[in-house]
Image (tube, rainbow, N blue to C red):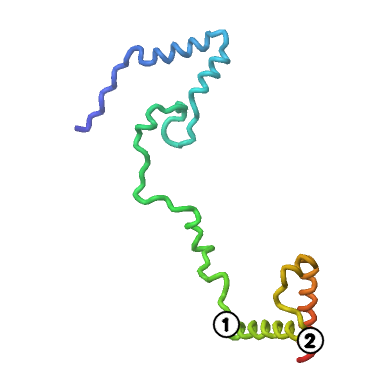
Amino acid sequence: DGKAAPVPSKVEGWNATWVEKKERIRNSEFRAREFFKESLRWKWSSDLRGPLKLPISDNLSGFRVKDFMLEPQKPVWEKLESLYGDDEPLDEEMEDEEFDDLLEHLDALESARSASGASSLVGKEEVTRRGLRHLAQALQEGAAGNKKKETEES
């Protein structure tokens, strides 16, 4: 009908409890302690809508219906996956030529070891007798000697 709603009538004593509590705190001898105890019951809301001051313990939190979304929120990394995602494998497969070169090199090292009389496998007694550091040094020297021989032959 387009008419304005009637002005509601005032209800006496609607804020009597609140006024009584404020007066009691204002008139108390230990006012700071009362204000502190009262402040422990409330927290400030950072939400832009709704009340600014909320009770710390919400008695109805277990009964309130939560925010259920039809589509669950995606993890943060999925937003950036299109920018930083890499579909290429980390290790590229060796080409046939590279694989053949590697086999030839290993065969050459093995033949050089057998020609020099050094066995490719070291026994337990030799490891305990000489020590790992000496064996590693000898193997490095042998590999360096083999490289020198290969360069001289070619």
Nearest the camera: 61 or 27?
A: 61
Nearest the camera: 3 or 82?
A: 82
**Looking at the image, which residue is at 49% across and 10% down?**
24
From the top left corner, tell me how far across and down residue 20 is, in percent.
44, 11
Q: Identify which amino acid the numbered label 1 is placed on.
A: Glu
**Looking at the image, which residue is at 32% across and 15% down?**
11
* Residue 124 found in image quarter: bottom right
Mark closer to the chain start, 2 or 1: 1
| Label total for image | 2
From the top left corner, tell me how far across and down residue 8 is, in percent.
29, 20
From the top left corner, tell me how far across and down residue 95 is, in percent.
57, 82
Residue that badge 1 annotates: 95
**Looking at the image, which residue is at 46% across and 13% down?**
21
Vertical order, 54 against 90 (above or below): above
Instruction: Give the crowd class for mark 2: few <14, some 14-19, many >=20 residues within 10 Å.
Output: few
Residue 93 is left or right of residue 125, and the answer is left
Residue that badge 2 annotates: 149
From the top left corner, tell me how far across and down residue 89 is, in percent.
54, 71
Q: Which quadrant would the C terminus be assigned to in this image?
A: bottom right
